[in-house]
Image (cartoon, rainbow, N blue to C red):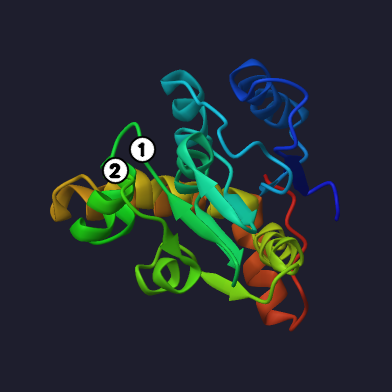
Amino acid sequence: MTAAVAELSLLPPGPLDEWLPARIESILAAATARVVLIDAAGAPPDAALSAACLRSLLLFELPVVFAFEGALAGGLAEIALAADIRVCSESASLRGPLASSARACTLADEGTALALFLGREALSADALLAAGLVSSLVPAGQSLAEGRRVAATIASRGPIATRLGKEAIWRGLPQPIDQALRFETDLTLLLQTTKDRAEGVRAFLEKRAPIFTGE
């Protein structure tokens, strides 16, 4: 992994609420990462998560990839759904109850979101993939490797465009379509002023891989 991918293990040095928000802030403060990869291996299955901690994840400006094996429930399920991309193994499952069904409703159909909110039964890996709650399903033991592959691909892209693309999606979803399109246009115009945009054009014309600097 390069410095452009910040790996964050949920193997806890203590309760998640005591260290996770600070770790997230330190990743931003370091200003080297372009994407965060969260590895859920070893995390306690009954981990609790406060609303403030969940909010820090939901509002995090960098793309977040979440890789997991086995069963997730409660607070860990909340963290998974707060991520932007989820990859899991064939042995994985996810169960509520969730503190809020809002994120699940955004990501999946109403019935699936309700099942997660109520926590009455675990969703299998196949069900998670069918509902669109995970983007990749891999053999057991390979979720972290797949997460690293996905994170490396994201990190190779223009970091400003990636961040603004995430913002356009999550802020645009709850808006009326005309407002969402106007917001997307505003962000696109902002991107036209960046050095990375000019580098992307040069690299295309010169038939080479672009070197993005985040400027």
**Residue toward you, 214 or 63:** 63
Q: CA distance from mark 2 to mark 1?
A: 5 Å
Q: Which mark is residue 215?
A: none
Q: Around disc 1, counting alpha carbons within 10 Å, would you say few (fewer than 14), some (14 to 19), or many (20 or more)? A: many
Q: Which mark is residue 117?
A: 2
Percent x, y of residue 210: 74, 68
Q: Is residue 31 left or right of residue 131?
A: right
Residue at the disc numbered 1: 98
On screen, residue 28 above or below 167? above
Label 2: which secondary element: helix
Circle 2: residue type: Phe
Label 1: which secondary element: loop
Percent x, y of residue 181: 24, 55
Q: Is residue 128 left or right of residue 80?
A: left
Q: Residue at x 69, y 59 (%)?
A: 151
Q: Quadrant of the C terminus?
A: top right
* Circles 2, 1 touching at the beta carbon (< 8 Å): yes
Q: Residue at x 46, y 33 (%)?
A: 59
Q: Residue furthest front?
A: 120
